[in-house]
Amino acid sequence: MPNNDEGFRMPTTQPSASPRNLPVKSRVRRKRAHRLVLRHLTIDDYDDMKSIMDIVYANLGGAWSYEQMKSQLAHFPDGQICIEDRGRVVAVALSLIVQYSQWGDKHTYAEITADGYFTTHNPQGDTLYGAEVFVHPDYRDLRLGRRLYDARKEMCEKMNLRAIVAGGGGSSTNALNRVNRARPGGNMPSASNGVMRLT
């Protein structure tokens, strides 16, 4: 069984470059530099998270409820991460741990996430299930999704989990993207038969 007792600590991040360090033309175009911080979500972030979800999932019913977020944080607080800019959450990644042999590829998103409550979280499981990643549209050119995925990979390694499975919101019926934990010196992911693996 994986040893998950140590938990996951967020990597330290530095705020983005100060406008003083940018060329003169960049200072003119960027009136206000971003101050991005990667951290764990708290229940106090619900309004920011709801705002983003209502925008990006407008055609899928919008945001999860306050009760769902509260349950997610209660079951696996280390798996709920975000990026904030000057105190406002602008990107979110939500995860839980599952025993992959229990679920396999034949499950619905609603089943594996317990309708968004994450009561299916198994601290003794072997796989990190990436339930959601979403970014505010105003921040989509900053590669924040990539930063969140990298934080998930680091979490997977530190918790000694076997793999990351990325699901999808709404009515997804299968976990389509399986990414095995990177080995030292591993290559970039490659797609084969709809499955992404680090080789």
Image (cartoon, rainbow, N blue to C red):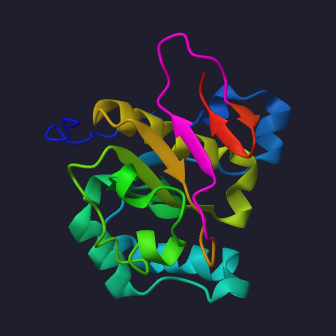
In front of the other: 120 or 184: 120
Could you say where residue 106 lies in the image, as x and y percent from the top left?
A: 53, 64
In front of the other: 110 or 100: 100
Q: Is residue 163 above or below residue 66?
A: above
Most extreme residue toward the right is: 25
Determine the main secondary structure of the stretch shown in magenta. Answer: loop
In front of the other: 130 or 16: 130
Q: Is residue 23 above or below residue 69?
A: above
In front of the other: 79 or 181: 181
Q: Is residue 177 magenta?
A: yes
Could you say where residue 136 lies in the image, as x and y percent from the top left?
A: 65, 65
Decide if residue 12 is in sight here. no
Side of 170 relative to 29 (left or right): left
Q: Quadrant of residue 57?
A: bottom right
Side of 119 relative to 12 (left or right): left
Count the marks: how many? 0
Residue at x-position 44% and y-position 46%? 38
Most extreme residue toward the top is: 185
Residue segment shown in magenta: 173-189
Decide if residue 73 is in sight here. yes
Q: Quadrant of the N terminus?
A: top left
Q: Is residue 98 above or below residue 24?
A: below
Could you say where residue 134 lies in the image, as x and y percent from the top left?
A: 60, 62
